[in-house]
Image (cartoon, coloured by chain):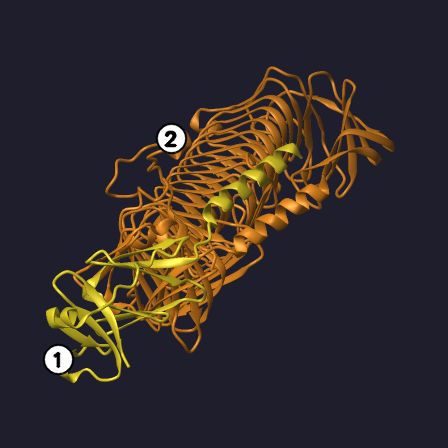
Chain colours: A yellow, B orange
């Protein structure tokens, strides 16, 4: 009986190691920015050049890696100025279509500059 | 203590239920990565993502989800769906080694290196039902195919086709029933319903039914082993199980209905031929080892064999109880009239060695044999019943044989096959066990070499010689009964030595004798010991260094008691047989007729009792026997010369 208990405890121990729960799936882009997504019932879909994870959207070509984390590692939101927009090399809508600054209407856009990539909401 | 265990189990289940998994769906394949093991999953150029060594093209991914699915390491699940498409689930730790291709329910998997898989192997677990599907595996690494309640039919090929020339375990999960079926193809485009180029280990405590409709039911290019499994095999045209190198059955319950041989083992042509090796390592012997379990084989194809070994056929009980039942009604394969092939229940091209088990072997086919060894036959244990119930093929000897040229007439050795109970081209050596042989149309126990019996119980009843050797016969122990209804009891074409044991021999009548040595060829019968009862007399000119006695007549269907010293052997006389009776024992025997057997150990299919307790009967007067010859028609005794 002792042997059985020992085996069972060892099994539990092994399972405990394997069963570590993560709260977030964190995405890191090539510019180093991070966005953590709650993993509860999370679905990731890919459409064109875009990966959507919950409420987050990423341009595939900007993605560097993803990994599970226990903490929200989302990089602090930086204010985008008009100058930032002027520096934008490329602007994409969520369908992956490249647009110009003048074509931006209400909606969500990916703004890529030389140093960073931003998600911008135009209201 | 029980409560503690319950807590632990409940905790384990709870933990198992909260596993966290990243599922990557590509078509009908779902790769499952335990979140705890994924680490960094790297994207490259917006084209690919690599997870646990598996690189996915992003354009191929339908979706990724995170849920609480449990992932069993090393496991690839294949779930068949009748009318739909199979779904393949791949554990993350082996994802990089597995490439599935799915078309409906036809699943083809390419497997690469698995040496890094926890020093273990991949398990492919099959479940579900389909009437048009398959499981095919290519690669060069060992693996397990776990059958978890699958019913898999492939009308256009093998149900399971494994190209790996490595060891494959086919394991039926405990409590599951599994069925594999292939289609019928006149061109025999595939080798078997269940085929593996490498070794097959059939095991598990579930059940597996294999229906082979084109060729063999189960075929391995290498060895096959069976353990625990409840296996039902049906082949309409080919062998039930066909393999190379060697075959081992350790346990289980195997039933085979074969279109050709039940079990056939050949040599692997590409490897050096070996004998038996330690743990069968690198063995290429063609041997068959049946050392436990229940084996039932039925075949009805001309020339077929219940079990056929190119090497030696070993039967014993080293693993567990062995019970073998073989029925063969196939008769002679005369497709090549210059090379007739007789059917047999057990056949070896080399030798047969039986040291344990219960064997019930019945061949009802024309010219068929129950046991047929091209070499030596050794019996040291077991309980064997071997029956040749068929008529002779192509024989002119009046047993109803049929030849292609018609009934009756003369026949040469090349165009007939005699139905024999046990036949060995080499020597027959019996040191133990119980052997009961019945031969309806020809010899019962025949050796083309010598027959040596030193132990066991041997009872042979035949229409020709009951026990026949092309060379010498020696009995030095055991209990031997040769009962012929049409010829000699024991017939040696060399010398016959009776040195010990008990011999009860019955011939059909003059000119035959109960114990016949080849006097005409310069040989003789040597009575040097043992206990002898010879109904119909013994060979003339015998050397009787142990005294013999005779009675000129005996009563049919009557129980007699032969007393030698303190040993009493009771025997029943046949309904017919040669005249007169010759007896011998270590001391002067006495004989009583019409006795009643009250107790004893029954042998010789009920015709004898050793250590008998008897009552009643009347004393038979015995005369000293001079060693002259057999008894003539109508009785008499001790006449020099004999009639045979």
Q: Nearer the viewer, residue B192 or B513?
A: B192
Residue B349, image x and y in percent? Answer: 38, 41
Q: Nearer the viewer, mark 2 or mark 1?
A: 1
Q: Helix or strand or loop: what does disc 2 sit on?
A: loop
Query: From where the camera sits, is residue B605 visible?
Result: yes
Q: Seen in the image, is B318 located left or right of residue A116?
A: right
Secondary-structure class at tag 1: loop
Residue lying furthest right: B616
Examine the image and state in which quarter residue B275 appears.
top left
Residue B245 is drawn in which quadrant? top left
**Which subunit holds the residue at mark 2?**
B
What whole-number distance in Å separates the C-alpha atoms at marks 2 and 1? Answer: 79 Å
Left or right, residue B77 beside residue B339: right
Location of residue B555 in the rendering, given as x and y in whole percent from the top left corner: 76, 40
Image quadrant occupied by the C terminus of chain A: bottom left
- Circle 2: is it few (<14), some (14-19), or many (20+) Cα within 10 Å? few
The tag on residue A100 is 1
Q: Residue at x 34, y 35 (%)?
A: B283
Q: Which residue is mark 2?
A: B277
Does the image show residue B296? no
Judge left or right: residue B210 versus residue B610.
left
Report the front residue among B381 and B282: B282
Q: Chain of mark 1?
A: A
């Amino acid at each position: 009986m002792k042997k059985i208990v020992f085996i069972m405890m060892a099994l539990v121990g092994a399972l405990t190691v394997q069963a570590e729960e993560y709260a977030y799936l964190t995405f890191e882009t090539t510019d180093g920015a991070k966005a953590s997504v709650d993993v509860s019932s999370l679905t990731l879909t890919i459409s064109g050049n875009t990966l959507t994870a919950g409420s987050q959207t990423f341009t595939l070509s900007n993605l560097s890696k993803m990994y599970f984390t226990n903490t929200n590692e989302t990089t602090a939101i930086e204010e985008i100025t008009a100058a930032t927009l002027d520096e934008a090399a490329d602007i994409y809508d969520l369908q992956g279509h490249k647009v110009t600054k003048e074509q931006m209407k209400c909606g969500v856009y990916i703004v890529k500059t030389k140093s960073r990539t931003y998600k911008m909401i135009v209201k | 203590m029980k409560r503690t265990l319950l807590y632990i189990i409940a905790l384990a289940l709870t933990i198992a239920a909260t596993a966290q998994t990243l599922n990557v769906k590509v078509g009908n394949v779902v790769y499952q990565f335990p979140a705890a093991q994924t680490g960094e999953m790297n994207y490259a150029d917006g084209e690919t993502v690599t997870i646990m060594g598996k690189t996915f093209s992003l354009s191929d991914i339908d979706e990724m989800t995170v849920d609480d699915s449990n992932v069993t390491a090393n496991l690839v699940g294949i779930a068949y769906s009748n009318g739909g498409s199979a779904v393949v689930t791949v554990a993350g730790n082996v994802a990089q080694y597995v490439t599935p291709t799915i078309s409906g329910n036809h699943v083809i998997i390419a497997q690469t290196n698995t040496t890094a898989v926890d020093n273990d192997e991949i398990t492919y677990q099959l479940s579900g039902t389909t009437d048009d599907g398959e499981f095919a595996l290519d690669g060069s690494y060992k693996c397990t195919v776990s059958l978890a309640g699958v019913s898999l039919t492939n009308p256009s090929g093998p149900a399971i086709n494994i190209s790996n020339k490595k060891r494959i375990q086919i394991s039926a999960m405990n409590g599951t029933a599994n069925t594999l079926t292939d289609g019928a193809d006149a061109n025999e485009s595939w080798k078997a319903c269940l085929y593996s180029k490498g070794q097959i280990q059939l095991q598990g405590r579930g059940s597996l039914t294999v229906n082979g409709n084109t060729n063999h039911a189960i075929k391995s290019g290498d060895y096959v082993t069976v353990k625990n499994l409840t296996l039902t095999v049906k082949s309409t045209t080919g062998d039930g199980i066909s393999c190379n190198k060697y075959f081992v059955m350790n346990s289980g319950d195997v039933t085979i209905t074969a279109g050709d041989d039940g079990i056939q083992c050949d040599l692997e042509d590409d490897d050096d031929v070996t004998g038996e090796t330690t743990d069968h390592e690198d063995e290429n012997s063609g041997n068959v080892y049946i050392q436990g379990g229940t084996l039932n084989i039925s075949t009805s194809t001309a020339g077929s064999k219940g079990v056929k070994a190119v090497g030696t056929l070993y039967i014993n009980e080293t693993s567990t109880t062995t019970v073998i039942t073989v029925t063969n009604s196939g008769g002679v394969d005369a497709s090549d009239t210059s090379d007739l092939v007789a059917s047999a229940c057990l056949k070896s091209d080399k030798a047969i060695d039986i040291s344990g088990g219960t064997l019930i072997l019945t061949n009802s086919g024309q010219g068929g044999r129950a046991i047929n060894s091209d070499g030596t036959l050794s019996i040291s244990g077991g309980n064997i019943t071997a029956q040749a119930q068929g008529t002779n093929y192509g024989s002119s000897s009046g047993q109803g044989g049929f030849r292609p040229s018609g009934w009756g007439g003369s026949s040469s050795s090349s165009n007939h096959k005699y139905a024999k109970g046990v036949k060995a081209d080499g020597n027959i050596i019996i040191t133990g066990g119980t052997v009961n042989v019945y031969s309806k149309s020809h010899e019962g126990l025949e050796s083309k070499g010598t027959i040596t019996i030193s132990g066991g119980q041997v009872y042979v009843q035949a229409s020709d010689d009951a026990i026949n050797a092309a060379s010498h016969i020696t009995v030095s122990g055991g209990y031997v009964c040769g009962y012929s209804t049409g010829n000699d009891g024991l017939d040696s074409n060399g010398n016959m030595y009776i040195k010990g044991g008990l011999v009860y021999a019955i011939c059909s009548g003059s000119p035959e004798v109960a114990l016949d040595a080849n006097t005409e060829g310069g040989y003789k019968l040597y009575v040097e010991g043992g206990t002898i009862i010879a109904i119909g007399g013994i060979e003339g000119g015998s050397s009787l260094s142990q005294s013999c006695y005779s009675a000129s007549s005996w009563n049919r269907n009557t129980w007699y008691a032969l007393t030698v010293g303190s040993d009493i052997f009771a025997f029943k006389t046949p309904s017919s047989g040669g005249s007169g009776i010759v007896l011998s024992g270590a001391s002067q025997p006495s004989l009583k007729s019409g006795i009643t057997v009250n107790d004893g150990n029954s042998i010789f299919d009920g015709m004898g009792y050793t250590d008998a307790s008897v009552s009643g009967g009347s004393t038979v007067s015995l005369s000293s026997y001079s060693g002259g010859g057999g008894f003539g028609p109508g009785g008499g005794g001790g006449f020099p010369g004999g009639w045979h």
